[in-house]
Image (cartoon, coloured by chain):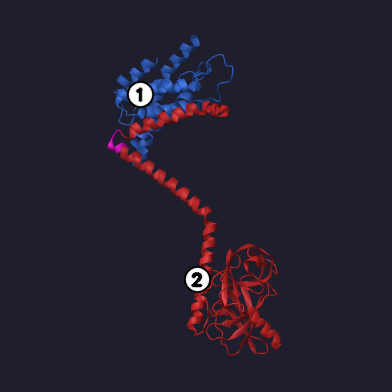
Chain colours: A blue, B red
Amino acid sequence: MTVVLLLLQIFVLDELSIALWIRPMLFPLIVMLLPMELRTIWVLLGSLGVGVVMDVALGGAGLYTATLLPLVVLRHWVMYITTGRSVEFGDQSSLLSRLPLRQLMIYATAMLGLHHTMFFLLETLSFISPLRLIATIVLSTLMSVVVAWPILRLFLSKIVVK
Amino acid sequence: MYRLLEFIKLIYVFVIFVVLEVAALWSYATSSPYTEAKILARTTAVGASISGAVTYTQNFFALPDENRALMERVAALSAEVQSLTMQQEGEVVEGMFAQDGDDSASHFRYHPAKVVSMTTNRQRNYLVLDRGAMDGISKDMGVVTAENALVGYVVSCSDHYSVVQPMLNVEFSTGGRLVDNGHVCVVWWSGDSMYEVDAKDLSVYSEPQEGMRVEVRSERLPDGVLLGTVKSYELNSAKSAYSAKITIAADMSRLDNLLIVENTHYHEIESLVQQAQ
């Protein structure tokens, strides 16, 4: 799934020109959907790998990595704030698999919004056109969520079946 | 050692995250002239603001020492001004530039002091200063602000502290003089307002005016110590003298660093006066 998402991002989404302001990004889903029970160090190293691949493939020069790594540190907090759930000691099943689709979508929206905010702020490095910046963040997040919807449904059905 | 290892184990993920994040940001920042200029400008601004905040905090905590040093300097300058004034008036004084702790002969010495406690809301108010007999302070010394405005007189001393009777005390009394014409008066406090004192026995020929400056006239203080300005005046019922309300020059509600003025000739003058009586 990781590879599929990476390829989708690099060869499809990045080539799309829906509008100048709308740039959907799905690769943060890779970090978001890693099991919450997985040790943070492995998630961190995994995110580093994804970030480096994206930077090399799309010429981000560290931008993709820099905006992906904070998600690793923040994802447990975002999960708790958006769904009120956290990984309990002795949990036998994956926390993500126990989330209803609605809560998973809220969590994904928050994480994507967070990522897109960091990404576009760092990419622009300017507040000359704040409205345009906000519009880019909001519209791109919404677009990402729309595209992520079927992927999240697929993800849920897969892990529930497992 | 074990605790150190435990601590490192606790934070190593976060440390790795910080290292990786900084490396990624550095890589991005140096990838083009635009990002380099933008990010370095921002980090420089943040660094400068942090540095500014640290410097401000350091300066804030250094203020007591600076205040002390400034008051020492004010004391030295006051002594110098006093000596120069006397020199100008043709008085021969040895040891013109005597300062705190100097034993040379000068009429007035200035000792910096800090207010420890004070009251302003009573009929008999007092100030406590952090200088006492061990610092060469004794009864009847004058107390002025750094702006050379009268505060009061020392009424008692312990080894390390002294008690001052300020103008805001119904038992306070001192001599005053109109700067413009030299007419003298007696200044006291009726207890009505913490911003005003009263003057009485002002000659009918003194022609007081509102706004006239009133100086202290006392052997305990040098000339030039400001008491206040005339706010209002009236002839007494016998039409033999004026009485006046004087706005106090010193802000009595905001006293902090003060100067205690010592007249080294005061006891000599006092004993002469007692002999004469």
Q: Main secondary structure of the magenta part?
A: helix
- In the foreground, B49 or A134: B49
Residues drawn in magenta: B31-35
Mark 2 crowdedness (10 Å alpha carbons): few <14, some 14-19, many ≥20: some
Quarter of the rendering occupied by the C terminus of chain B? bottom right
Residue at which label 2 appears: B77
Residue under the point 51% across and 59% down = B66
Letter of the chain that mark 1 sits on in the rendering = A
Q: Amino acid at mark 2?
A: Leu
Per the image, label 2 sits on a secondary structure element best described as helix
Coordinates of residue A120 in the picture (x, y in percent): 36, 33
Mark 1 crowdedness (10 Å alpha carbons): few <14, some 14-19, many ≥20: many
Q: Is residue A137 above or below residue B40?
A: above
Q: CA distance from mark 2 to mark 1?
A: 69 Å
Coordinates of residue B160 in the picture (x, y in percent): 66, 63
Q: Amino acid at mark 1?
A: Val
Quarter of the rendering occupied by the N terminus of chain B? top right
Residue under the point 56% across and 25% down = A84
Q: Which mark is residue A103?
A: none
